[in-house]
Image (cartoon, rainbow, N blue to C red):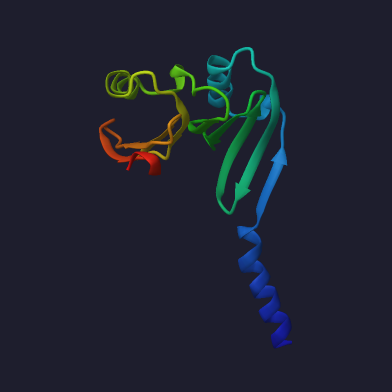
Amino acid sequence: MKRFLYTVLALMLVLPVAAEDVEIAFDRLPEKAQKIVGKAYPDTRIKKVEMERRASLIQYEVKLAGGVKLQFSKDGSLTECECTDGAVPDVLIPSKIKNFMADEFPGREIRRFEHDGKLYELLLDNGDELSFNSSYRLIDIDRTAEQK
């Protein structure tokens, strides 16, 4: 009987942590996320939309034609945009970061943009990684090995 109770208790602890990815229709995304996709990629075909559940965390992933992957939080805020071909659209980048990039890294493309609520992280086409704080100030540059 003790073994059974321990097994049930262990399952109760493990099951809520289990991950679940469910493919959903685009119109089931939060409205905010739908607007972002429409604004940044108005003519791009949507390949797949998934709702990802991890314990109490819910996020959405949208894959588009052309190697674009977007991630959104539960409320529809953009948390990541990754482009294998081409640059992250300017409309997704905060204007202060865009201005900084134009001044300090002219001609460089942003291939990945991440925002976790506190930090903004960019991956450039030359492999450099830039980190900005919530006030859009550059706080770190991680240069590629060939530039070090």
- Image point (43%, 36%), residue name: 127
Residue 9 position, x and y percent, is 65, 74
| Vertical comparison of 66 with 52: above or below | above
Q: Single out the residue that lies furthest toward the top.
A: 43
- Image point (53%, 32%), residue name: 82
- Image point (52%, 31%), residue name: 81
> Which image quarter holds the C terminus?
top left
Q: Is residue 76 left or right of residue 122?
A: right
Residue 56 position, x and y percent, is 55, 51
| Vertical comparison of 129 with 12: above or below | above
Q: Is residue 29 left or right of residue 144?
A: right
Q: Count the numbered circles shown.
A: 0
> Which image quarter holds the N terminus?
bottom right
Q: Nearer the viewer, residue 133 or 72?
A: 133
- Residue 144 appears in the picture as rendered: no
Q: Single out the residue that lies furthest toward the front.
A: 146
- Which of the 4 image quadrants contains residue 114? top left
Q: Nearer the viewer, residue 80 or 33?
A: 80
| Vertical comparison of 61 with 35: above or below | below
| Vertical comparison of 87 with 143: above or below | above
Residue 129 position, x and y percent, is 38, 38
Q: Is residue 3 left or right of residue 56?
A: right
Residue 31 position, x and y percent, is 57, 24
- Image point (49%, 24%), residue name: 88
- Which of the 4 image quadrants contains residue 21? top right
- Which of the 4 image quadrants contains residue 137? top left
